[in-house]
């Protein structure tokens, strides 16, 4: 079962991180990723650029309209996302709790949809 | 794969014999498995170009043995040891395997220390002869992820230091259940695939059925092996009728039964009837017997629902679990009316294993629709649609809810 881990934070957290602590978090993040690679639960992880870099696209009457900024203006935004493939929701929650950023912001766990299905 | 299908089938067929021969001769399950995989890859490239060798099995054993001894020697050199690993060519005794090691390998790959995902991956590679890339594609994960899963599984097997032999008699029955469960998981992965990018996964049902056939051939008197094989055939028989061309799911009651595979049904029915008549009853036989009743009925209304209910009662006694109760409730509703089914469902509402599961809501919706309570049915279809993580199930459940909204009587 694949899960998306969305790591949320805000400007206060992402913008004012003491260098030493930042290095520690990076080290822990790399260690966790290495562990998940070794266990075969790793699919991918991406850091997301700052909100000021966001563009939002809408297609109206066949014409794309591009606006600056995120679709939803919120104090909390996505700093990075991980995709894992693991045995159960319990395991996904266990991994989420080990994401170092969970200590400062929030980690949202979302199951990913699959094409497989059972007729009822 | 660029190889033609027949080479691939042949390679998968003899893969466990080749691996068994190597492990018997040299030990080192882990390194032997890698060597066999390399030999299979070499054969897949060379045979279509240069022609198939006269004795494919001997060719594979020879190539794999060379790779293995090369590997063991270079490992030995790296450790700067005075190793005396035999470098001789495989002898005749090795080239003509005396026994079929498929079962021993299956027991090894489904060792209880491994997670279900690892058991599945290792079984497909070591016994099924599939490449890591093929398994990764079937499970929609990157090849590196699958390679890690397989390598971790092999390390764990190495750590358990189990001898290359059948498990002790006392453990054998439990261990066989684990093997059957793994084969069942592989089958299900393939069967639930619907369309588009998932088509590759259909291969998994074929692999699961092929391996279960092999186990049945080796253990013809085990009723549960026969039961699982029958269940697979009776389920596979409905494949063509279970989805629309766009991948949409068609419920059993609405499937075009003329598209069911008669030959598979006949074979499945014969297998399960024979098992029920002469072996100890078990959950796979019961599930196969229920599938047989559905497969033999000309329509949903003509199904022997009373018999289905009786079989579910037995199944709940032999192997109680909330999914069985769900299906039981549907059958009860067909015999005693929707309210009786809903009453049975109510017993699951406090069961943590299923209370939040979309299938409970879906079955409740179905029974409420039968009872004519379209408002509540619609609400339950919608809840179920939101809770499933399957796209085709979601589309199906939303369509059911929408159909009730359009219905002027609701």
Image (cartoon, coloured by chain):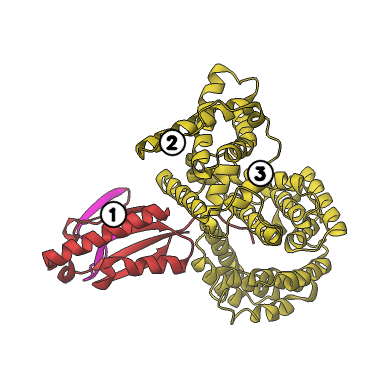
Chain colours: A red, B yellow
Tell me, yes or no, whether dots 2 and 1 are on the same chain.
Answer: no
Q: Is residue A46 visible?
A: yes
Quick one: SS at disc 2?
A: loop
User: Pointer 3 indicates a residue of which chain?
Assistant: B
Categorize mark 1 by other alpha carbons within 10 Å: few (<14), some (14-19), many (20+). Answer: few
Q: Residue at image x 55%, y 17%?
A: B50
Q: Is-magenta flag for residue A64?
A: yes
Say which of marks 1 and 3 sits in front: 3
Picture residue at 38% right of the left edge, 53% below the top: A38
Residue farthest right in this picture:
B277
Q: Is residue A43 left or right of residue B281?
A: left
Q: Label 2 to label 1, Cα distance in Å?
A: 46 Å
The nearer-to-camera label among 2 and 3 is 2
Residue position for label 1? A46
- Earlier residue among tags 2 and 3: 2
Circle 3 SS class: helix
Residue B189 visible from this viewpoint: no
What is the span of residues highlighted in magenta in the rendered image? Answer: A63-80
- Asked if badge 2 and badge 3 are on a common chain, one would say yes
Q: CA distance from mark 2 to mark 3?
A: 31 Å
Q: Is residue B160 magenta?
A: no
Assess disc 2: are there few (<14), some (14-19) or many (≥20) residues with their C-alpha within 10 Å of its C-alpha: few
**In the image, which disc is placed on residue B83?**
2
Q: Is residue B259 above or below residue B313?
A: above
Find residue A87 and report its horizontal and vertical position in percent. 48, 61
| Residue A115 coordinates in the image, percent (x, y) | 51, 53
- Residue furthest front as drawn: B82
Left or right of residue B63, residue B91 in this image: right
Label of residue B102 in the image:
3
Front in this rendered view, residue B364 or B190: B190
Image marks 2 and 3: residues in contact by CB distance under 8 Å:
no
Do the residues at pointers 1 and 3 share their chain? Answer: no
């Amino acid at each position: 079962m694949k899960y998306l881990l969305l790591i949320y934070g805000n400007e206060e957290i992402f913008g004012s991180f003491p260098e030493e602590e930042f290095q520690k978090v990076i080290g822990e993040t790399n260690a966790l990723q290495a562990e998940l690679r070794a266990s075969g639960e790793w699919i991918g992880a991406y850091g997301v650029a700052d909100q000021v870099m966001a563009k939002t696209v809408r297609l109206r009457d066949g014409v794309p309209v591009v606006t600056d900024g995120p679709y939803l203006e919120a104090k909390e935004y996505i700093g990075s996302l991980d995709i894992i493939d693991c045995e159960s929701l319990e395991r996904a929650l266990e991994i989420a709790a080990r994401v170092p950023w969970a200590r400062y912001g929030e980690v949202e766990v979302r199951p990913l949809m699959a094409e497989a299905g059972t007729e009822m | 794969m660029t190889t033609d299908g027949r080479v691939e089938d042949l390679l998968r067929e003899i893969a466990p014999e080749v691996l068994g021969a190597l492990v018997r001769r040299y030990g080192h399950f882990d390194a032997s498995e890698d060597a066999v995989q390399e030999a299979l890859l070499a054969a897949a490239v060379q045979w279509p170009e240069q022609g198939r060798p006269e004795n494919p099995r001997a060719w594979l054993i020879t190539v794999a043995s060379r790779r293995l001894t090369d590997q063991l020697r270079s490992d030995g050199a790296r450790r700067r040891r005075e190793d005396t690993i035999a470098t001789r060519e495989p002898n005749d005794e090795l080239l003509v395997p005396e026994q079929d090691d498929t079962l021993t390998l299956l027991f090894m790959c489904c060792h209880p220390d491994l997670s279900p995902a690892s058991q599945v991956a290792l079984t497909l590679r070591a016994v099924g002869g599939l490449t890591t890339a093929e398994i990764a594609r079937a499970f929609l994960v990157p090849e590196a992820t699958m390679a890690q899963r397989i390598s971790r599984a092999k390390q764990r097997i190495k750590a358990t230091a189990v001898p290359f032999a059948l498990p002790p008699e006392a453990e054998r029955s439990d261990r066989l259940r684990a093997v059957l469960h793994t084969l069942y998981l592989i089958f299900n992965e393939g069967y639930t695939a619907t369309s588009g990018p998932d088509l590759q996964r259909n291969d998994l049902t074929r692999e699961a059925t092929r391996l279960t056939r092999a186990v049945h051939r080796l253990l013809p008197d085990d009723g549960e092996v026969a039961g699982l094989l029958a269940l697979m055939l009776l389920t596979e028989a409905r494949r063509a009728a279970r989805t629309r061309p766009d991948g949409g799911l068609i419920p059993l009651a609405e499937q075009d039964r003329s598209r069911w595979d008669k030959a598979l049904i006949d074979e499945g029915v014969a297998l399960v009837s024979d098992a029920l008549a002469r072996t100890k009853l078990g959950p796979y036989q019961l599930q196969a017997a229920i599938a047989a009743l559905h497969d033999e009925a000309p329509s949903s209304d003509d199904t022997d629902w009373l018999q289905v209910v009786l079989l579910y009662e037995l199944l709940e006694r032999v192997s109680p679990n909330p999914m069985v109760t769900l299906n039981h409730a549907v059958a009860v509703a067909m015999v005693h009316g929707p309210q009786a089914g809903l009453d049975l469902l109510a017993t699951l509402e406090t069961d943590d294993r299923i209370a939040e599961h979309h299938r409970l809501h879906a079955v409740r919706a179905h029974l409420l629709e039968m009872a004519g309570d379209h408002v509540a049915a619609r609400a339950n279809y919608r809840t179920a649609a939101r809770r499933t993580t399957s796209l085709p199930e979601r589309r199906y459940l939303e369509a059911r809810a929408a159909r009730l909204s359009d219905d002027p009587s609701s």
